[in-house]
């Protein structure tokens, strides 16, 4: 046979290292003999085994001996009297379990040269014995249980002592004369003792007698005082420890002061409530009621009031780094888990949802959601379903706090308010470019004025029947009539709605009409086309869906561009500022919740999203 190496399984190695610090105690339970050949099995696969196949015999350990602090010698004997059918012994498996846990396969001892185990013939009982060394983190944490068949019991030892007439320690102690000095204890003389050659100390110096002291031998007295002073020089007096901390924070070995396990603790909360006054370190095993982790935790508790109405604070942490702080009183333990820093999305940290108590004119720079409740100083013309953006307009090194607040909603309304001037003051909510863009009222007034001074024709025939002086057409007391140039001036300032047929969403999605409004204005003097408005899909759950705006019906090319919008950038949860890169004369936007809002690239009034071109269509 050739049984050379015992391989610890992964479960066995975990159990062996778990004895460090008293976390678990190992009990070696049994060993098995198997006819299965594992000799060709790779070592890594052996370590992953959880059981042994083709078990022929199962026995308890015959002997377990602690060789040193970390090494055990284990012996198992497989007797032939238990064998009814002969077999080839290829493998020995060793089983163990933690003190309060389930049994696991601890180690595997394979061989390519098996032992042949014959069936018991009723006469010869032979043992096939195996002895192996194994290493654990702390041999003192091994619970040793061996088969009585493999070890001497107390009765056997008593019989040996009796037959061999061996004196026990008690026999020896009973026959020691009372006058004999026990060298392991302080000398206790039962009667006066005469030292014929005088008494000396360990260095050979003569010891002074009471007579020497009574006679006042100056040399002897001086030597005795020096000796006493020397002995007391490095000793601490009780009075010097009055201000010392007497209560220990940890155990004598520097480990946890308290260990709460399933064997000694019913509830962690009650255990902490019962701690005495002071600062305490503790360990709590996984499975103890009140442990907030599925793993063992360690922590510190500071009890400021002990007794029936305890008060205190502390923290817990487990091997994953999870951290809990707690406050304890008579009602229980109030735990609060700290968030994992790696799990926090920085974009979420930079944004928040406003409530009715928030003031939009007192916010720090950033982007905020308005979703239902209306914050203070929110513009009345903007729905409370959108975002508020706060920007600092002044440079970092400026002492002036100029800022811009913009409000956008899902209905394509947009207002802004600027904090500037001397002294600093809010401008009040305004629509973008309201100072130069014609309002609905302006347009209505202009159309009414034009209509009142217009040459009318028959709607059926188109014939102008009204006499008109076209060379110097005036009305209403000599007022001039608008010329083509006048009308063109109005047209140049007007915004036009892009026909929705030039706006195409991705396949499977539909524009919401008339909610979709993409407006454009042309300044041909500088070959610039301005854009504003919103794109709305009928599917309010549409995220990151391409919607293309075709400008080829207006301009022949795009030279430069600056087109920003509120839509999809990184996440489906909220709108972000993004920019569009044209392809030909097409602009593609990515909505969030079915909406993309074309915005101004700057908060300064008079600036819009725009593209430049060479020629109009």
Image (tube, grey):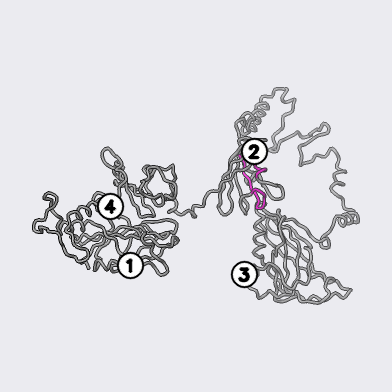
Between 80 and 298, which is closer to the camera in this rendering? 298
Residue density around tag 2, few if under 14, some if 14–19, many if 20 or more, within 10 Å: some
Q: Position of residue 374 (x, y in %)?
A: 42, 46
Task: Name the mark nearer the viewer: 3 or 4.
Answer: 4
Q: Position of residue 53 (x, y in %)?
A: 72, 72
The residue identified by callout 2 is 330
The answer to which of marks 3 and 4 sits earlier in the sequence is 3
Q: Are marks 2 and 1 in contact (CB under 8 Å)?
A: no
288 part of magenta stretch: yes
Between 497 and 365, which is closer to the camera in this rendering? 497
Report the residue at 40% width, 70% height from top: 507
Task: Name the mark nearer the viewer: 2 or 1.
Answer: 1
The residue identified by callout 3 is 44
Q: Position of residue 328 (x, y in %)?
A: 61, 40
Q: What SS does tag 3 mark?
A: helix
Left or right for 601, reference 151 = left
Residue 75 in which image quadrant: bottom right
Distance in Å between CA atoms under marks 3 and 4: 81 Å
The residue identified by callout 1 is 501
The residue identified by callout 4 is 440
């Amino acid at each position: 046979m050739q049984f050379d190496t015992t391989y610890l399984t992964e479960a066995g190695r975990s159990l062996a290292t778990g004895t460090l610090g008293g976390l678990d105690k190992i009990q070696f339970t049994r060993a098995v003999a198997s006819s299965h050949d594992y000799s060709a099995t790779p070592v890594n696969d052996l370590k992953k085994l959880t059981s042994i196949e083709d078990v022929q015999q199962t026995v308890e350990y015959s002997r377990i001996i602690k060789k040193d602090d970390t090494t055990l010698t284990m012996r198992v004997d497989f007797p032939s009297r238990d064998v009814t059918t002969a077999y080839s012994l290829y493998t020995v498996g060793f089983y163990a379990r933690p003190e309060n846990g389930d049994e696991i396969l601890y180690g595997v001892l394979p061989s390519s040269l098996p032992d042949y185990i014959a069936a018991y013939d009723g006469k010869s009982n032979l043992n096939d014995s195996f002895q192996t060394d194994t290493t654990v983190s702390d041999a003192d944490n091994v619970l040793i249980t061996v088969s009585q068949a493999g070890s001497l019991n107390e009765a056997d030892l008593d019989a040996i002592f009796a037959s061999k007439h061996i004196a026990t320690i008690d026999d020896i102690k009973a026959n020691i004369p009372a006058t004999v000095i026990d060298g392991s204890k302080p000398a206790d003389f039962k009667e006066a003792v005469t030292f014929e050659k005088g008494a000396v100390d360990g260095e050979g110096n003569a010891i002074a007698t009471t007579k020497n002291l009574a006679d006042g031998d100056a040399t002897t007295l001086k030597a005795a005082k020096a000796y006493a002073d020397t002995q007391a020089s490095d000793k601490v007096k009780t009075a010097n420890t009055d201000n010392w901390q007497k209560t220990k924070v940890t155990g004598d070995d520097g480990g946890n002061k308290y260990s709460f396990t399933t064997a000694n603790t019913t509830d962690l909360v009650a255990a902490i409530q019962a701690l005495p006054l002071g600062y305490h370190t503790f360990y709590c095993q996984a499975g103890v009621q009140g442990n907030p982790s599925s793993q063992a935790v360690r922590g510190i508790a500071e009890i400021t009031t002990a007794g029936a109405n305890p008060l205190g604070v502390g923290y817990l942490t487990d091997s994953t780094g999870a951290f809990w702080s707690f406050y304890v009183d008579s009602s229980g333990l109030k735990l609060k888990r700290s968030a994992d820093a790696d799990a926090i999305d920085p974009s979420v940290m930079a944004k928040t949802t406003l409530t009715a108590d928030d003031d939009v004119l007192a916010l720090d720079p950033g982007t905020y959601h308005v979703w239902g409740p209306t914050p203070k100083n929110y513009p009345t013309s903007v729905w409370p379903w959108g975002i508020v953006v706060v920007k600092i307009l002044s440079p970092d090194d400026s002492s002036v706090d100029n800022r811009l607040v913009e409000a956008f909603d899902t209905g394509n309304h947009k207002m802004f308010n600027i904090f500037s001037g001397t002294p600093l003051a809010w401008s009040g909510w305004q629509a973008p470019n309201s100072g130069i863009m014609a309002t609905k009222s302006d347009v209505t007034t202009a159309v009414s004025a034009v209509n009142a001074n217009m040459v009318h024709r028959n709607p059926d025939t188109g014939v102008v029947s009204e006499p008109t002086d076209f060379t110097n057409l005036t009305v209403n007391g000599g007022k001039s009539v608008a010329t083509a140039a006048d009308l063109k001036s109005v047209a140049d300032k007007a915004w036009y709605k892009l026909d929705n047929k030039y706006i195409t969403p991705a396949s499977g999605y539909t524009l919401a009409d008339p909610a979709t409004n993409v407006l454009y204005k042309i300044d041909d003097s500088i070959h610039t086309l301005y854009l504003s408005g919103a794109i709305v899909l009928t599917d309010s759950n549409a995220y990151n869906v391409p919607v293309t705006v075709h400008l080829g019906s207006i301009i022949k090319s795009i030279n430069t561009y600056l087109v920003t919008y509120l839509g999809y950038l990184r996440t489906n949860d909220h709108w972000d500022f993004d920019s569009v890169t044209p392809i030909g004369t097409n602009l593609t936007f990515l909505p969030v919740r079915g909406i993309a809002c074309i915005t101004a690239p700057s908060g300064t009034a008079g600036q819009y999203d725009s593209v430049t071109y060479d020629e109009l269509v």
